[in-house]
């Protein structure tokens, strides 16, 4: 299964849509929603960021799967309030229902991804709230997370194009046992609701050697581990050598996937052709474009053993390495 993420839509990310945050100090959706006129701006953004044509384009270009990030506020009843006492976070069920319908219409499968949990599971802006990872400190936050997952499962369980539900995006904290207990509880609850055959996806938390085998599947409800394989963010990947990055994408990633596959299938839920600044420094624009093509090809070869991959992201305001559609249209990424 090959696909794309519909990020920056129902969970805001400033770097994907900087114009939405223009003139504001806000860094995430929580902060954005405390600014004047935020609700109206957000509704307009949700209405304009994607159109039916986007789903047609995705299907027409050989992709089969869309991973749709949503926040815990998806149902519109999150208890967080702003300084004026009003509900802070806007639900997005109408938009999600629309995306499900467009996906069905164009023959696409859907992975619903809980991208932001109450209190934040990673303290990053893409969880909706940057700062502390309070999700790990509060059992009530974890219970609310399971509740949201259950409600998503009930709402969409009869959609035969629902490929799976991802329990939580990119949790990051040393308290791995807390995460594993959550995974097991959530899995146990969802298998009582979902149709047999629906995948239940869990993040490796960037420590696959610790979370591998975290969930023991029951018959009819396969488990898939999600690994996000970037080579542009981490100090140990800040190599000048282009050959290093191509070799790692093609060989090391394949070896990791093969090892994980011994316990359960694995998917690459996020990847891109972004490389460290040191690697691309001094390259001409033409050379950068050629490198993106080579790097994309190497990664697709390395991910061949995965159950699925979904590129981050389908689109963005800038035509850069995070914009799958622009990369394909500009000949910088050739799907294989």
Image: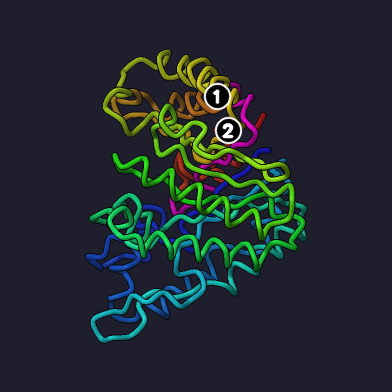
Along the horizontal axis of the image, is 179 left or right of 324?
Answer: left
Tell me the tag on residue 257: 1
Front residue (pair 178, 271): 178
Q: Do tag 2 and tag 1 residues touch (Cβ < 8 Å)?
A: yes
Front residue (pair 299, 145): 145
Q: Quadrant of the N terminus?
A: top right
- Among the 4 quarters of the image, the one containing residue 106: bottom right
- Residue under pointer 2: 266
* Label 2, label 1: how far apart the Cα atoms are: 7 Å
Residue 190 in the image: above or below residue 320: below
Region of the chain picked out in magenta, as a range: 298-318
Q: Residues within 10 Å of mark 2 (few under 14, many from 20)?
A: many
Residue 258 in the image: above or below residue 270: above
Q: Mark 2 or 1 closer to N-term?
A: 1
Q: Position of residue 305 (x, y in %)?
A: 63, 24
- The answer to whether residue 260 is magenta is no
- The answer to whether residue 303 is magenta is yes
Helix or strand or loop: what does disc 1 sit on? helix
Q: Quadrant of the C terminus?
A: top right
Residue 278 in the image: above or below residue 47: above
């Amino acid at each position: 299964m090959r696909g794309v993420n519909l990020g920056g839509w129902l969970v805001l990310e400033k770097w994907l849509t900087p114009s939405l945050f223009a003139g504001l100090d806000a860094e995430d959706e929580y902060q954005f929603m405390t600014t004047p006129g935020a609700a109206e701006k957000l509704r307009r953004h949700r209405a304009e960021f994607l159109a039916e044509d986007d789903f047609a384009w995705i299907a027409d270009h050989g992709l089969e799967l869309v991973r749709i990030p949503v926040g815990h506020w998806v149902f519109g009843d999150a208890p967080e309030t702003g300084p004026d006492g009003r509900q802070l976070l806007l639900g997005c069920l109408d938009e999600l229902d629309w995306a499900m319908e467009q996906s069905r219409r164009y023959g696409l499968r859907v992975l619903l991804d809980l991208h932001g949990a109450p209190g934040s599971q990673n303290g990053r802006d893409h969880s909706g709230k940057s700062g502390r990872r309070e999700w790990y400190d509060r059992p009530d936050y974890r219970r609310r997370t399971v509740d949201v997952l259950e409600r998503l499962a009930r709402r969409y369980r009869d959609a035969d194009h629902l490929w799976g539900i991802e329990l939580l995006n990119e949790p990051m904290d040393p308290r791995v046992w807390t995460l594993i207990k959550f995974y097991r509880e959530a899995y146990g609850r969802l298998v009582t609701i979902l149709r047999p055959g629906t995948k239940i996806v869990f993040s490796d938390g960037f420590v696959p050697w610790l979370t591998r085998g975290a969930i023991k599947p029951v018959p009819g409800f396969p488990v898939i581990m999600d690994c996000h394989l970037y080579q542009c963010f981490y100090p140990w990947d800040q190599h000048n050598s282009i050959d290093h990055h191509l070799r790692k994408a093609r060989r090391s990633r394949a070896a990791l996937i093969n090892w994980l596959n011994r316990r359960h299938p694995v998917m690459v839920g996020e990847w891109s052709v972004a490389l460290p600044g040191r690697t691309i420094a001094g390259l001409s624009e033409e050379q950068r474009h050629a490198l993106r093509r080579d790097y994309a090809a190497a990664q697709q070869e390395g991910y061949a053993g995965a159950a699925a991959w979904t590129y981050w992201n389908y689109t963005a305001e800038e035509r850069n390495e995070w914009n799958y559609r622009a990369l394909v249209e500009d000949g910088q990424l050739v799907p294989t």
